[in-house]
Amino acid sequence: MTIKREDMSMKLPGRIRKISQWYLDLPVVKKLSLSYLTIILIPIILLSILANKVSTDTIIRKTIHNSVQNLNVITESFNGLFDYVENISAIIVATDNIQVVSPVNLRMDKTRVFEFGHLIRDELDTIIQPRKIISSVVVYLDNGNIFATPYVDTNRIPGESISSRQYHDLF
């Protein structure tokens, strides 16, 4: 039993019927060429889709990994910075010349406070050299006196609490 071309194309709807009729009308050599081309193109298309998916996933994974590494480097940098600042503040607190200027000693006359102020400024300036990370230091004492490195204008610093906006305006 053989199937006739007319019977086969009559059972298919609209456009598919036209395409089927076009294919059935082709000579055998062209049908074979078209079949081989289809058989070759399907794996190529599937491989390209798979390669695209794999490369996209790899790029996304590497981007995430690089971002995590960058964040780790930034975190380590900040940790080093905070450790340095903490060490400097510990040195300032432990320095004898600064500790001499206690609230009791600062109840003296203005000349004596001025002399202690210069002594503290020089000491603070020596501690923060070579100014890589910390460029200036301000020391607030309980009695309201403020001492700072030479780059800070202590006249502009209020004697009581200082807000973050005031701090930003000063430096």
Image: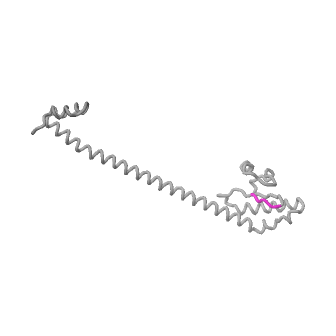
Residue 122, percent from left and from top = 76, 61
Residue at 42%, 51% in the rendered image:
59
Residue 130: image x %, image y %?
Answer: 67, 60
Q: Is residue 55 left or right of residue 108?
A: left
> Which quarter shows the N terminus?
top left
Q: In the figure, 96 relative to 66: above or below?
A: below
The colour scheme applied to this rendered structure is one colour
Q: Is residue 171 visible?
A: no
Residue that extends furthest to the left in the rendered view of this protein: 1
**Residue 59 shows in the view:** yes
In the drawing, does residue 164 fall left or right of residue 55? right
Report the front residue among 49 and 73: 49
On the rendered structure, is 34 left or right of 52? left
Of residue 105 and residue 21, the one placed in the foreground of this image is: 21
Q: Position of residue 13 (x, y in %)?
A: 24, 32
Callout count:
0
Q: Quadrant of residue 32?
A: top left
Q: Where residue 79 appears, x then y in whole percent?
A: 61, 61
Q: Which residue is at the front of the view, 171 or 166?
A: 166
Q: Is residue 98 magenta?
A: no
Occupied quadrant, residue 28: top left
- Magenta: main secondary structure: strand
Please report the bounds of the magenta region as a residue range. Answer: 138-142
Q: Residue at x 74, y 66 (%)?
A: 93
Query: Taking 13 as reference, is 74 above or below it?
Result: below
7 with respect to 74 (left or right): left
